[in-house]
Amino acid sequence: MRGDEAREILGFCPNSRPNLAEVKAAYKRKAMQSHPDLFPAHQKSQAEMKFKQISEAYSCLKDCERLGNPTGGSYVHVARRGAYKSYSRHNKALIRTPFFLLILATVSFGALNASRAYRKEKEACPSYNPFLP
């Protein structure tokens, strides 16, 4: 849902920029007016749809205000400017080295424990199968 649609659903002008307190007050007011429990059984489905729209509009405007993007689209920032520069580090080897060492240590200790267990099992129960070492 775009920000201008969300503002219209909550009762604001499409070009207005309400703050978080105003958005919250408008949401409470609209939610109380269109809550499905206040309507008779034959109008309940329409009231539920309206209530879901109001909740979606509130979450859209709340997230946009929290992220500092009053236009209503949280994807606009990344699409215009691309990824942040902090994601493209120049020395990637320093980032990969600790992970590589962890994996290497895990594999080597696992192989050491497996060979030790194999030797103990071979000593405890010798096998006379000619195909096994």
Image (tube, rainbow, N blue to C red):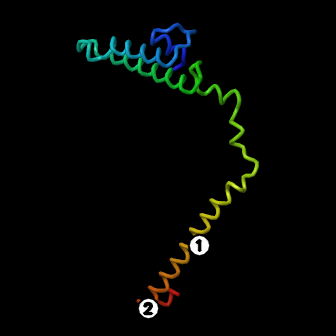
**x then y, percent, for residue 45:** 31, 17
Foreground label between 1 and 2: 1
Quarter of the image for residue 55 reads top left
Give whichever of 62, 55 is nearer the camera: 62
Quarter of the image for residue 54 reads top left
**x then y, percent, for residue 78:** 65, 30
The residue sitting at 51% across, 26% down in the picture is 63
Q: Is residue 119 above or below residue 28?
A: below
Q: Which mark is residue 126?
A: 2
Q: Which mark is residue 108?
A: 1
Contact between labelled residues 2 and 1, with CB atoms less than 8 Å apart: no
Q: Residues within 10 Å of mark 1 (few under 14, many from 20)?
A: few
- Secondary structure at badge 1 equals helix
Give whichever of 19, 58 is nearer the camera: 19
Give whichever of 66, 54 is nearer the camera: 66
- The answer to whether residue 44 is left or right of residue 92 is left
Q: Which mark is residue 40?
A: none
**x then y, percent, for residue 52:** 39, 20
Q: Residue furthest left?
A: 41
User: Which numbered disc flags the more N-terminal residue, 1 or 2?
Assistant: 1
Give whichever of 125, 55 is nearer the camera: 55
**x then y, percent, for residue 56:** 44, 22
- The answer to whether residue 64 is left or right of residue 97 is left
Q: Amino acid at mark 2?
A: Pro
The residue sitting at 59% across, 24% down in the picture is 68
Q: Amino acid at mark 1?
A: Ser
- Secondary structure at badge 2 equals loop
Marks 1 and 2, how far apart at CA: 26 Å
Q: Residues within 10 Å of mark 2 (few under 14, many from 20)?
A: few
Q: Residue furthest front?
A: 21
The residue sitting at 28% across, 15% down in the picture is 44
